[in-house]
Amino acid sequence: MNIGKQICVLIFVAILFISLSTAADEENEDVYMLEEIVVTARKREQLSFQVPLSVSTIQGEKSDALRSSGMDVRFLSNRTPSLQMESSFGRVFPRFYIRGLGNTDFDLNASQPVSVLYDGVVLENALLKGVPAFDLQRIEVLRGPQGTLFGRNTPAGAVKFESARPTQTLDGYGRISYGRFNSVNFEGAISGAIIPSVFSARLSLLAQQRGDWIDNAHTNEDSVLGGHRDLAGRLQLLWTPIPELETWFKFHARDLDGTARMFRANILVPDEGDLVEDFARETVSQDGRNEQMLRSGGITAEIRYDIGNLQLVSLTGLERLTLFTRGDIDGGFGAAFLPSSGPGVIPFPSETASGIPLLSQFSQEVRLMSTGENRLNYQFGLYYFREFVEMEDYNYDTLAGGVQDGLALQEQTATALAAYGSTTYQLLEDLELGVGVRLSHDTKDYTAWREEAPAVTEAGTLDPIHQNPEDTVWSGDLSLRYQIAPSMQTYVRAARGFRAPSIQGRLLFGNEVTVADTETILSFELGTKLRLLEQRLHLNLAAFNYNMQDQQLTAVGGESNFNRLVNADNTIGRGVEAELLFAPVNTLQISAGISYNYTSIDDPNLAIQGCGAPCKVLDPPASAEGTFSIDGNSLPQAPTWIADVTLRYMLELSSGIRLVASTDWAYRSRVHFFLYDSEEYSDDWLFEGGVRLTCQLPDTKTEIALIGRNILNDTSPTGGIDFNNLTGFVNEPRFWSLELLRRF
């Protein structure tokens, strides 16, 4: 543990102590009750207190603060128990991990065990999951298998984004900020009735721009990398011609241009894993190109029709996307066989790109559900999903001026059909039984071929390789919820989930297409939810244990830039989670979360290739040369501990001005980046803090805020490239900005 990180912990403890001391001094003041949050974790509006599930919500000022730097959706990482995120693609392609379960795969058709839904529509491809989060009602993080209501590819959990909906009254807001790196962030919305009580609309806009701030020492160019321009918009129309009918339409689009992930050569100290002493965020030395472009858009339509005590719901989603992203993968310049190269030893140059000329996704769900407060509540539904994606992988000869010298192509059509039913029954006044089951059929039709091989491989072209895996799987859940007292609920839940078969064929540097069979998980969870001190303290506790069979794992890298899918016989996991929301006085609010996760691969026969870079693998060698046994390893990017805390203090002045100070801190413990564990490709911990100082003017509609993110400038590696040199990439830098908000 270095001195800087020790100081971070001391500051964190001091802030918590001061805040609690302030609360004690004001204990005689009037207090107010905390509002119980409404969630849709079971596809119907319910109080979070009454849901037998480990669920977190982020909304309001906390959401605004976390997003205030203009960061992409990874602002959620480590901000709720058991949720970790990372990306090797920059502002696109986020990889989610819940309770240690995720996927480090960087290929464009990679599946993930964490599902992301935006206004109820599943976003299957990881690139769609990077959709900007703005003008939101709330974010829900559902932990544990969600196989009944949300279906395929949810064995770890689901993250749900819910847009702020159109209103009958005219309202809206606009916020604009300017900060470090010439960053300009704008977010705004306007909502109101077009025809009173019949037709309303809401228009939401997001514009984010950051100037280039990274120098390229190799080309002697200043401020040429690191920037981006990200635009997004959403139009919603709500039509209610009669009380029984509600029709909602959403049109959304995104346009991104900027810098892809910045890979940095040899920034990891051999045999240690720490960053080199002279590491500087503001400088790279590269001879390859870096660029990223993404265009996406979609339409969502939801129709609700009441039929007596029943409601018929239709939800339709259409998404389209194109992408091109290119980067200097070796992170440096030159090569060891040339007169000059660096930083450090660069065995050979590597510059690649990935593109999606077309991604098209269509989903349709129809469900019939009971309404009102009944002893028996139920819903039944049918679901259809179809995705088509074209993928291109390019290689470039950096030493010849960056000319293309490799091209591999992939196409995949994925289809899913499902039928499900879910019901809750009040066995006794204080005892509720929940049962759900879903039957799913998944099919993938995949083709990959190579039109041009990189010159160094001398491999030539490769004829099309076809794969067509399919499977029919059931998933479901069973729960009991018991209300011990009006302020205390406890529950037990068993759930089964699955991930459909996956295919990997990155053929630029290999001739093999690998298929991973269906993975399944059986999870048991016990939880308690408490509402104490006259609704001034909310406490949620959960303990869980799961066993996953045939887990799909990605063996990334090795001696070549190649991916290979494998199935682990068994993976076990267990842990505890706790969340606290406390308002000791009406001027202070404290929210905190902590989780402990233990994961272990249980497969004595599973061995993978070690790193091609000069790293020190800590796992025992396997029988095949250059391979290592990963039996007993924890999962990659799976920290044992995650903790976060947010403190908000408000001071009202006699002039009518209100001052609000808030600070938020997040911590995660050690992670290793790949299936094998090594000294270099890991990070001991990450500790980031933010601050927001707000002045609310007497009109209550205008705010001026000073914002800081990663204020102690924690610099931690978050991933690496292991087939060439000790390349890594790091977390976001310290950021400051000034923001103006106006509501109307």
Image (spheres, helix red, strand yellow):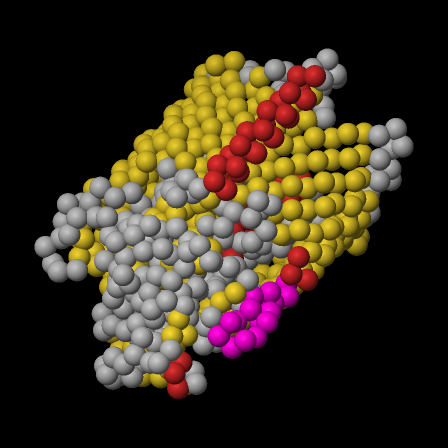
User: Left or right: where does residue 163 sit relative to residue 482?
Assistant: right
Q: Which residue, as the protein is rendered here, is positioned at the far right?
A: 655
The quarter of the picture where residue 657 lies is top right
- Residue 660 shows in the view: yes
From this view, report whether residue 536 is shown above or below residue 150. Answer: above
User: Left or right: where does residue 216 sit relative to residue 545?
Assistant: right
User: Left or right: where does residue 368 sit relative to residue 132?
Assistant: left
**What residue appears at the point 72 percent right and 57 percent down from the top-left corner?**
178
From this view, report whether residue 309 is shown above or below residue 680. Answer: above
- Residue 293 point in image, percent of width and height: 54, 71
Q: Is residue 178 magenta?
A: no
**What residue appears at the point 52 percent right and 59 percent down from the top-left corner?**
281
Stretch in magenta:
210-225
User: Left or right: where does residue 388 sit relative to residue 448?
Assistant: right
Q: Is residue 219 magenta?
A: yes
403 or 566: nearer the viewer:
403
- Count of numbered labels shown in the rendering: 0
- Residue 515 point in image, percent of width and height: 25, 61
- Residue 443 point in image, percent of width and height: 32, 60
- Residue 49 shows in the view: no
**What residue appears at the point 63 percent right and 32 percent down from the top-left corner?**
647
477 or 673: nearer the viewer:
673
**What residue appears at the point 56 percent right and 66 percent down from the top-left corner?**
214
From this view, report whether residue 296 is shown above or below residue 167. Answer: below
Which quadrant holds the N terminus? top left
- Residue 387 point in image, percent of width and height: 42, 64
